[in-house]
Image (cartoon, rainbow, N blue to C red):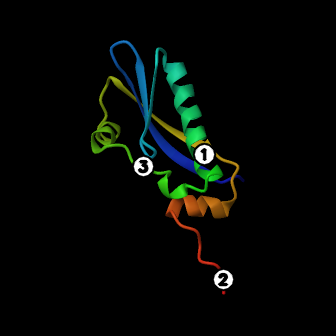
Amino acid sequence: MRPKLHLDIVITQEEDYWLAHCLQLDIVTTAETLERVKSDILDLIGVQISYAFEHNNLDNLFFPAPAEVWKKFTQPVDEIEYIEKEISLDIPLLEIQELCYGQAPTPAA
């Protein structure tokens, strides 16, 4: 079984576009259709995570969205579509632990 990282995404329909916001990474994108905004936000998340691993920059990967965006996620409103998306990553468990705790484990003596 591959390790998984769970990220929450809130998607809202604005006047003439859709807006997607990944809450744990504070990544935002817009598109003209719901299908496109879903695809675009997942692509951006994948790029952000890949970049963090490639450049050994896990300390700066998680940057939470502002409180008002989290409030939208926790207080349901009819015109907002909420999406919880699990993103599967092919990365070793050790790196998942580093990602979750923001530090590398202490080497054994």
> Which amino acid lies under the numbered mark 3 shown in the image of this protein?
Phe
Q: Earlier in the sequence, mark 1 or mark 3?
A: 1
Left or right: residue 27 versus residue 4 is: left
* Spot occupied by residue 60 in the image (x, y as percentages of width and height): 48, 53
Q: Earlier in the sequence, mark 2 or mark 3?
A: 3
Task: Report the residue marked by disc 1.
Answer: 51
In which quarter of the view is residue 18 placed?
top left
Numbered disc in front, either 1 or 2: 1
Badges 1 and 3: C-beta atoms under 8 Å apart? no
Label count reads 3
> Which amino acid lies under the numbered mark 1 shown in the image of this protein?
Tyr
> Which amino acid lies under the numbered mark 2 shown in the image of this protein?
Ala
Q: Earlier in the sequence, mark 1 or mark 2?
A: 1
Density class for disc 3 (Cα within 10 Å; few <14, some 14-19, many ≥20) is few
Which residue is depicted at the point 65% across and 54% down? 3
In which quarter of the view is residue 16 placed?
top left
| Foreground pick, 18 / 57 | 57
Label 1 to label 3, Cα distance in Å? 15 Å
Give the numbered dot on residue 108: 2
Give the numbered dot on residue 63: 3
